[in-house]
Image: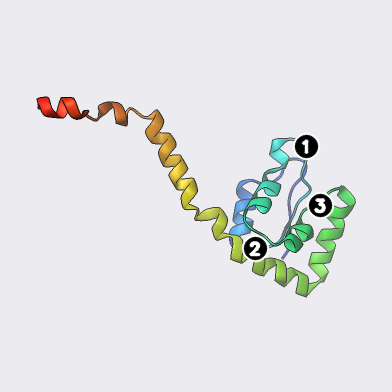
Amino acid sequence: TVVLDSYPAGGDTTTREVIEMGKPLVTLPARLLGGRWSLGYLSNIGLKESTKKALIATDAEEYVDLAVKLANDDTLRQSVEDDMKACAPNLFRRQEAVDAWQDMFLEISPYQQCQPNKMQKEEL
């Protein structure tokens, strides 16, 4: 199986699902954010350079060429799938992302404001 990313508005949720399944996703990043989600995910999960080169096209002709090559080359496709499966946890199970969200919510929430400070505790 080879999945083709839509253009010019690329995958976001779909791309994450494809990564989780460990399947090759060929993408042609567009200029605007909506067409660059797949590029962002594939560039940040720790894939080998050879895998990224097999998945990320720089123009329409290369997009077609990459898709055809992956569809016809079982060895290449298996190598890409193995790398995708190995790197998928880097997208879905990142403690630093959880920590960053937690820090942000604690900073903007009234939680800190509701906690009695040391002087208030002594008065109680």
* Separation of residues labelled 1 and 3 (CA atoms): 13 Å
- Residue 98 lies left or right of residue 81; in this view the side is left
Mark 1 or mark 3: which comes first in sequence? 1
In the image, residue 42 lies at what x, y percent?
A: 67, 53
* Separation of residues labelled 1 and 2 (CA atoms): 25 Å
Q: Quadrant of the C terminus?
A: top left
* Residue 123 position (above or below residue 75): above
Residue on which the image places disc 1: 31
Residue on which the image places disc 2: 84
Q: Type of residue at label 3?
A: Ala
* Separation of residues labelled 3 and 2 (CA atoms): 17 Å
Residue 29 vs residue 100, the one in the foreground: 100
Mark 3 or mark 2: which comes first in sequence? 3
In the image, residue 17 lies at what x, y percent?
A: 60, 55
Q: Residues within 10 Å of mark 1 (few under 14, many from 20)?
A: few
Q: Type of residue at label 1?
A: Arg
* Residue 82 position (above or below residue 8): below
Of all residues, the one furthest to the bottom in this rendering is 75
Residue on which the image places disc 3: 57
- Residue 48 lies left or right of residue 106; in this view the side is right
Q: How crowded is mark 3: few (under 14 residues within 10 Å), some or many (20 or more)?
A: many
